[in-house]
Amino acid sequence: MSGAQGGDLNRNPPRPGRLDHAEGASIPLRSHVREAQPRGAVINGNHPIDQAEAAERFIAAPEHERMHDARLWDLRQKRDRQMHGIVEWEDLRRLASEIKEHALTHLDHYLEQFEANARANGIHVHWAQDADEHNAIILSLLRDHGVRRLIKSKSMLTEECGFRDFMAESGIEVVETDLGERIQQLDDEAPSHVVVPAVHKLRSDVAEVFARTLGTDPDDDDVHYLTEQQREKTRPLILDAQAGLTGANFVVAETGTFVVCTNEGNADLSANTPPLQIASIGIEKVIPRLEDLPVFVRLLSRSALGSPITQYTSHFRGPRRGGELHVVLVDNGRSERLGMEQFWTSLKCIRCGACMNTCPVFRRSGGLSYGATYAGPIGLIIDPTFNRHRYSSLPFSSTLNGSCTNVCPVRINIHEQIAGWRKVLAETHELPLMKKAMMREAGHLLSHPALYRAAIATADSALKHLPRFMVYNRLNTWGHGREVPTPPRQTFHEWYAKNRPTGQGEPT
């Protein structure tokens, strides 16, 4: 039950026969403390998201912060164990990156090839320029078929398009079949992670949500009980639905097919239970050939959850007998991003979430603090392409440590693109006045070595003697949530001047 486990970090000894990957290798997590769940970033029209404010509230809930950090770091460690078990891991990453780069630089050709082959397979193919067109196409299909209820599997693209809210306003009920997404839907929250949507919740949070919406026992937070109760309440809605919608992990141009990877089989329920099947697919998901697919399948679940493969890897080639299958290929800004010389490779992303699992900022601040569909490192480089002003603060929510780039299965240079967005935002005057002034002064200081050395010496001397209230105040943003480093006895410049080899000059 991803995303609904607590924060007790005691590790149980391995049991005989226990799986050594995925949930079988997870650290048992259980919280015995009830704590109110912190909510996400405050959305205020088109004003910039204050990720730091939302992160501060998340950190102020210690059980949630501790559980979230431990759970995601556990996923990162399991990913590493899988990586070290495959000699050709780096070759796979390189090959996956090259395949995606080739597909993206020939995107028009492969999309047209997919469309032709999909139509030959009996699939109806639609094209959507943006989110509004995507939603309108699907609404038209649903009304033509008299659909009152739609079941769907997890899809970040539909989240990006505001699909569920649009359908609710149009009088059509949408039921999430992924457990984590269903938890978030019942709690009226967006997913906080691209793979484990409710990972920020404690078991007690899920128990409270289910008690309020499904009538379960609010004091029973047993995982099996909660899962079974959700299944019993949701299964009748699934069986009564007139249409099902999925996303797609990969689209194969050569065969006109698409592939959906899940661990719960919920995509198969959405695709095969109702007579009308719809797939919403971003145009960047296309790969050239079927023989390219195993490269990504080997990387995807290992990078995401530390398991060798997803439980269900389903290939959809055409409609079921007596049914209809529609595919909606969605642009929604992707073509524009493809034209961004510095940022287009973000389209390689296969939505594994590995960069989130390793990111120290994401692990400690929660995905909802970003106030965007895509959180964490990958979100920092994708979100500004949707709305540069609203998401102008997000690229600064990073330490630029490079861990995200190191784990990315398709080798996106994420940390370099984050730094690149910072430069773009500064050049386009999207920085807050205070940050702009501070960066200007820092630039002046760093460009004058003598002034910089004098400032460092003065600051170090002051920090040794100033009372705490003069160091930790509203003007010192570094001191919000962290301790200022202890001043060293001497600077590197002083040490080098004293210890440099004879005949060598001053350090530059």
Image (cartoon, rainbow, N blue to C red):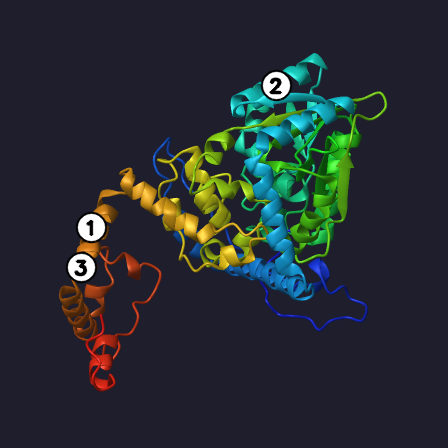
Amino acid under disc 3: Leu
Residue 299 is situated, as x and y percent measured from the top left of the image, at 66, 53
Residue for point 43% across, 60% down? 401
Amino acid under disc 2: Ile
Residue 307 is situated, as x and y percent measured from the top left of the image, at 70, 57
Residue 148, quarter of picture = top right
Q: Does dot 1 land on a helix, a strand or a loop?
A: helix
Mark nearest the camera among 2 and 1 is 1
Residue 463, quarter of picture = bottom left
Residue for point 59% across, 60% down? 76
496 to the left or right of 140: left
59 to the left or right of 141: left
Residue matched to label 2:
137
Residue matched to label 3:
445
Q: Is residue 332 visible?
A: yes
Q: Is residue 428 above or below residue 492?
A: above
Residue matched to label 1:
440
